Image (cartoon, rainbow, N blue to C red):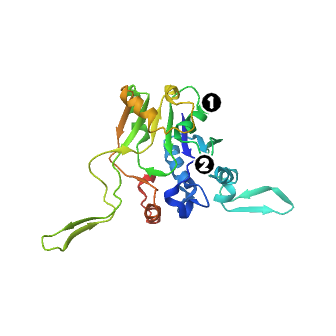
Amino acid sequence: MKTVILCGGKGTRLREETEYRPKPMLPIGNRPILWHIMQRYALYGHKDFVLCLGYKGDLIKDYFRNYRWNSHDVTVSLNRPEAPRFQDPDDAVDWTVSLIDTGLDSLTAWRVRSVRAHVGIGPFFLTYGDGVGNIDLKKLLTFHRKSGSVCTLTAVHPPGRFGEIRLRPDGRVESFNEKAQTETGYINGGFMVCEPELFDYLPDSPMTMLEEGPLRRLASEGKLAAYRHEGFWQPMDTYQEFTLLNRLWESGKAPWTA
């Protein structure tokens, strides 16, 4: 199965970082968040990717063009520069990555529509290039197949944007929980599975959001399913979330790696 990742947005809420690079290239540790998302899929054996590029897509192309140079130690012979020796020949990254320009200002429905020829004739995964989670992709795919839907999204609890404070009657703080996750309600966390019929719902217009017309129409026709994920999920929408994900990575206990 192909995995389509939306990588073309401008990330305006993280302008202090995305002015110079696309949001999927913002680092968690020494790797871009895009790599972490792809690694999650690869963990389940899904290693064939289609990246929908837009804003500063050339930087994403450069990253994969020079992937081994950027990721590994290397020895070069100056009289034979075409034959570098990488220090970790047993590197298990064996992904196939298609890098497709889907327009600078186009919205998500058009970006997906633009890669139709690259996803084949069967179902495919679809997600965003700015969020990580410990979603069980095998269970997600099984749920989708049983649902008989055109598209199955992963329903997640939205992360709290602010710390939760509980107060005592006298005004003292009883407890403070940083970025508590909402316990009720769900939002679309991406990590979707789609049938080829999805393309019949995508209009011939670059100014349509996938989450508006197409998914709403599927929902109204009973063809949109939701796989409930109660585990970890975190987008990178703000600088605070950028630093949170890096703290989790530095702790050695990043939930999306398990």
Q: Is residue 201 above or below residue 251?
A: above
Measured as percent of width and height from the top left, residue 120 is found at: 59, 28
Q: Is residue 164 left or right of residue 127?
A: left
In depth, the one of 92 and 1 nearer the eye is: 1
- Three-letter amino acid code at the position of disc 2: Val
Measured as percent of width and height from the top left, residue 23 is found at: 55, 55
Q: Is residue 222 left or right of residue 29?
A: left
Residue underneath mark 2: 93
In depth, the one of 1 and 92 nearer the eye is: 1
The residue drawn where x is 41% and y is 55% is 255
Q: Secondary structure at mark 2?
A: loop
Q: Secondary structure at mark 1?
A: helix
Q: Residues within 10 Å of mark 1 (few under 14, many from 20)?
A: few
Going from the N terminus, do you reach mark 2 or mark 1 first? 2
Residue underneath mark 1: 117
Which residue extends farthest right? Answer: 79
Query: Residues under labels 2 and 1: Cα distance?
Result: 25 Å
- Three-letter amino acid code at the position of disc 1: Ala
Q: Is residue 209 left or right of residue 8?
A: left
Measured as percent of width and height from the top left, residue 130 is found at: 50, 51
The residue drawn where x is 37% and y is 31% is 219
